[in-house]
Amino acid sequence: MEKAEGLERKSGLEREDGSERKDGFEKTEGLDKRELICVRCPVGCMLTVTVREDGTLDVKGNSCGRGEEYARKELTDPTRIVTTTVRVRGGRQAVVPVKTRYDIPKGKVMECIEALKEVEAEAPIFLGEVILSDAAGTGVDVVATKSVERTADN
Amino acid sequence: MDKKADILIVGGGPAGLAAAVAARKDGIENVLVLERDEELGGILNQCIHNGFGLHTFKEELTGPEYAQRYISQAEALGIPCLLHTIVVDISAEKDKKLVTAMNKKDGLFTIEAKAVVLAMGCRERSRGALNIPGYRPAGIYSAGTAQHYVNIEGRMPGKEVVILGSGDIGLIMARRMTLEGAKVKLVAELMPYSGGLKRNIVQCLEDYNIPLKLSHTVIHIDGKERVKGVTVAEVDNNRKPIPGTEEYISCDTLLLSCGLIPENELSAGLGVALNPVTAGPVVNESLETSVEGVFACGNVLHVHDLVDHVSEESYAAGEHAAAYVKEKRSVRAETVAIKCEGGVRYTVPSLLRVEYMEKEQVVRFRVGNVYRNVFLTVYFNDKIVIKQKKRVLLPGEMEQIKLKKSELEKFSDLKSITISIEEE
Amino acid sequence: MYDVIVIGAGVTGAAIARELSRYEYAGKTAVLERASDICEGTSKANSGIVHAGHDAEPGTLKARLNVLGNRKMEQLSRELDFSFKKNGTLVLCFDEKDRDKLRRLLEKGQQNGVEGLRIIEVQELRAMEPNISDEAVAALYAPAGGIVCPFGLTIALAENACENGVEFHLNTEVLQIERTQEGYLLKTSKGVFESRIVVNAAGLYADALHNMVSERKLNIIPRKGEYCLFDKSAGSYVSHTIFQLPTRYGKGVLVTPTVHGNLMMGPTAVDIEDKEGTNTTGEGLGDLLKRGGLSIQRVPEEKVITSFAGLRAHESSGDFVIGEVEGAPGFIDVAGIESPGLTCAPAIGEYVAEIVQELLPVPKKADFKVHRQGIRAMADADEGERKELIAKNPAYANIICRCELVTEGEIMDAIHRPLGATTLDGVKRRTRAGMGRCQSGFCAPKTVEILARELGTDVGEITKSGGESRFLTGYDKEDIGSA
């Protein structure tokens, strides 16, 4: 692999033809072009997104519809599903794994984590149970991804 | 407490559960799962991140949610599972297998089974195997151990972290530790490419501005009681550190994510032939090992990237085990070897009995290097039967190819199947 | 006021303590150890070889104690229930020109009183060790040589001494020694101790302690030895302990099976300055594999499960320094105990106990407990014994370390027996939990949990090996939003 300056550039994210991936937009014939890796599934398709003059997007390189959806979101409104844990009171496990039911704006991830720092869930907890509603003002609930039984002595 | 089972499954993780469900659905009444942990689900219980199940359930689940899907299926089918039960020995006598296990409730006991499915999973490569020079302080963990502490115990194994190895667990833990308040300073990868999935590099490192240095390794561990720092250096093409590139990074924790190894102590004790490349059993199209009636699936067979593939493979193993119990297939059937060439490191299966294969046989494999714009070629004897253009093949991502029974049957004198990567 | 205090709970200190515990002292006897556990210094990182005794120069204390210690080991292993195997040693000769050296070694051994020594030719050698290097032309065979578990030996001696009434004070570092009317005042990190007799078995630091009471200074040089340990699947690669005559790469390294069935290679020998410098080095490990490789057909490098380094306490004089210090009555040095110190330990114990007897003669105890029962290992037990153990404590059915088949029951025993384990390393050395091919990846969290539960503390307090070696640094999200 070609050696490049900077750490980020050494992240192994090359285009499939071997050239380096361009971060940000690149002007080509008056069009905005951007390269992305679709993270909607583990396949990791390399997407080439072109913003047409009318503002619509042209996505290439995706092998399913989710790729196009991902590219659109990643360019206009990047979002992530947050997974973490929340402390449990009276349960057979110290913490319960949780996730945001839907993806939330990327910029809200840490705020969501901070909000969850203050939460303690009372066992028993059931898979899918809302642990925190409207996390960090995103309108998205945080739900348990596992059931936690109550300890016998509680 | 001595028991009998038609099919005994060693391991109640995703592989064991899928095999159990398949066997039960195929009409085997007496399926028994032995799980060493106190709950089913295996390592998925600590993989609380999302990204599981897209292939199997067409939705994105977290590890515990994915596990629960199979646990619920097993429960609905009334499959008995002995928890907190560890298998200490398996032996085979012609058509019966004796499995010695123990747990706190029943003590030491033996189960006689007609067929056994090995689904013990894998373990992480240790520091020792990597032989990093330096002290041996506290603060050196495998990524999986850190994952257990953070995700199961709610405890932090460290505050300032360097990760060696860009395997998926390491990448996932870079994000997890960051989200839980630790500072992840660097991920160093010995190879010139990452061993993890691209999506994890994007979502776990790039999102959090965690640097990844390829062709770098840890050459010294500092700190006598607790880790104080590590020295990282760039390596040359022979993976030897390049003098002058050393950099000291202060940290209190070194996480190791340097790959996984199938856990085959029980298999070896049973006399199952192992493939030195995968460290898993050599299997045929039915995922049956060299010991008749003993099947293997999931990460004990070869390390997978996706649990969806584990489930699919293990479901097949369960079906084959059921067929074995019902039909008593002949081990003497004509067997063809699948050979690897030109960068294909291994295939699973590596043996094929055309007579017993399904209409389509999935052959999974990995490559030993990064290949671009190559052809994936399959030969029956010397004849090319499949030639597929591949834009990219990566060592970190398992590939698969499907062989058609109808095409194989056309070859009356089939001696070998060869899977190869070829230049244009 | 103590009658005797031994400083240092390594194999030497433990052996001395055990021998002292045979006697009916009017006052108390104690061992002071600066580490959080016994067997934390040189004794935990060495070759584990019971040397036959052909190396030491005839007439030296080393030569005498080596042969004596070797002869005592088998009996001792039965009394104290630790792993020992008389597997025999071979010293390889790679060059016809070096046959003289081999003969000289034979003569030295015979002078020292080593039994059964003989030179064997290549054919016999190959029959004994099929994987031996093609370069070997002959070897000195010493059937009296053996292997021992160094932790097993040290811990067994200490436990037995403890059961026979010797106090052990851990985390107790001797900082200062003052002469008093009746003996010595030891100022430690855990208060002041006064004793009539002091035995200095402080290993690498024996010089510092000696120099507190004597004008004639000792100088202990830490000599680093690096080792590689291989997986049990390589354990039968050789069956004897294989030494080398010095080669073109310098002093040879040994290749040996361990009593637990691993293969081990080491040690290098580099004099360093830092007495805490137990780090392995890239050069050292590389050099080791190269030199070890001379003895065998192929080094199974892919099977290395861990590497470690130990520091031998080399005294400039070259021989052991054992005896009452001139000008410091009642202060007994046991210094410079480098290889074959482990082999010599049982003999050193007796030798020092005799010196103490001369200074403070007391009768032997009538009720001395000769025997000590080790931890029952499920891995070595047969079906009947396994069932019996589980019946006694169901925790024996709960495997914690999968690689070495160590159960919760054994770990509980390790914690609750005399001088029980309080750290992860302590459990490891007593039970082997974490010593296998995964090197504690899976079992460390479980062992930490059992330690916390049995010791009545939080898992956050459990350390790897005392001091600041805590396993955990806090709770999830503790540092979130606080900045």
Image: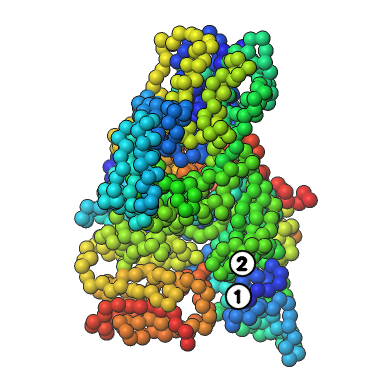
Q: Nearer the viewer, residue A141 or B103?
A: B103
Is the residue C464 above or below the residue B393 in the image?
above
Rate crowding at label 1 as few (under 14), some (14 to 19) or many (20 or more) other CA atoms within 10 Å. Answer: few
Report if the CB atoms under discs 2 and 1 are less than 8 Å apart.
yes
Q: Is residue C444 visible?
A: yes
Q: Is residue B85 visible?
A: no
Q: Nearer the viewer, residue C461 or B61?
A: C461
Percent x, y of residue C226:
52, 46
Chain letter of the residue carrying label 1: A
The residue at the point 52 percent across, 68 percent down is B396
| Secondary structure beneath label 2 | strand
Dividing the picture into quadrants, the one containing residue C387 is top left
Locate the N terminus of chain B by quadrant. Answer: top left
Discs 2, 1: same chain: no
Residue found farthest to the bottom: A29
Dividing the picture into quadrants, the one containing residue B244 is bottom right
Residue found farthest to the right: C483
Q: Nearer the viewer, residue A125 or B165?
A: B165
Percent x, y of residue B280:
38, 60
Under mark 1, the amino acid is Met
Rate crowding at label 2 as few (under 14), some (14 to 19) or many (20 or more) other CA atoms within 10 Å. Answer: many
| Secondary structure beneath label 1 | loop
Q: Give the residue number, with chain letter if any, for mark 1.
A: A1
Chain letter of the residue carrying label 2: B
In the image, B202: left or right of C357? Answer: right
Under mark 2, the amino acid is Leu
Q: Give the residue number, with chain letter if any, for mark 2.
A: B214
**Disc 2 to disc 1, how far (Cα)?**
10 Å
